[in-house]
Amino acid sequence: MTRSENINELAAAMAKAQGEVAGAKKDSENPHFRSRYADLASVWDACRGPLSKHGLSVVQFPRLTSIGESAWAVEIETTLLHTSGQWMTDTLAVPISKADAQGVGSAITYARRYALGAVVGVAPEDDDANAAVGHAKHTNGAAGHAPSATAPRSASVGQTITNVAVNKTSTGKTQWAVTFSDNVTATTINPAIGQNATTLWNAKVPVVATLEHKGRFVNLMGLKKRGADDDAPELPVDDYRVEAPDESSIPF
């Protein structure tokens, strides 16, 4: 993150704006879990008024960058500006799942939503979507407290991986956020699963995934290429879970 020499006026204005920022409305449908999530427009609707009222604005600049042979990522540079001329900026990179206009556009929207929510502090409004499909609502404990071993699990069979984003948790661990073709995003801190997700994403093949549901968070517990006889995923031997999911790495 880079910033202007001074940010005192920006910080004061941001403190006031965040006191007025509402939760982003979940107005997009997740068909796999019959739940709803907040899209980019909803995140903007939640923060545009308070930002403008206190002399703040956000601009985002996309660009393409090579991350390897025939592999590309979208970088979104998000800058928070204040009328005093003070500013803060940082960049988020998201790999492109398919090197065409649709793949680039999807990655740009994905990165813009995550970056805007993280910079401004927009969180989604809570709802009872998980209860609607028989999943009891849970709350996360303190950082470092793993979810219960009895958390509900489900199988996702035959989906393809449309995106893999790599970032850091609040405790500094590497975390993979894996998005499937049914718009479900699950996270893992298991390096083997994360690296396998990247391989299967690049291969564009159907997969079998084991998903653990913790309230509105979804942990990726197992992943493999789908075989001809697969109707349920194998559970991994090592039980890795996200210790404290970061809002910036979980889809609204």
Image (cartoon, rainbow, N blue to C red):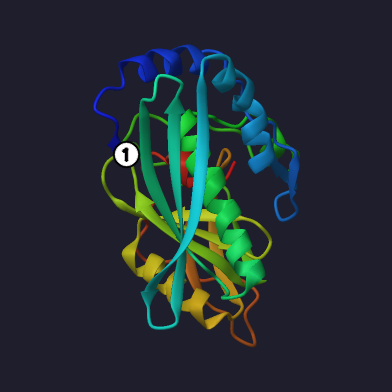
Please state the horizontal and vertical placement of residue 234, each as a whole percent of the image.
Answer: 50, 71
Which residue is rendered at x = 29% and y = 30% of the image?
4
> Image quadrant for the N terminus?
top left
Residue 140, percent from left and from top? 45, 32
Q: Is residue 150 visible?
A: no
- Report whether 100 appears left or right of 148: right
Splitting the image into 4 quarters, where does residue 70 fall? bottom left
Circle 1 residue: 170
The image shows residue 88, relative to residue 185, as above or below, that is: above
Q: Nearer the viewer, residue 106 or 59?
A: 59
- SS for callout 1: loop
> Which residue is at 44% across, 29% downward?
81
The residue that appears at 54% across and 47% down in the rendered structure is: 112
Q: Position of residue 22 (x, y in %)?
A: 61, 21
Quadrant for residue 131, please give it. Answer: top right
Provide residue 110's location: percent of width, then percent of height: 57, 52
Foreground of the two, 133 or 143: 143
Q: Is residue 40 above or below residue 178?
A: above
Q: Is residue 183 visible?
A: yes
Q: Amino acid at mark 1?
A: Ser
Instruction: From the viewer's perspective, tell me whether residue 80 is left or right of residue 29.
Output: left
With respect to residue 3, does 15 lie above or below?
Answer: above
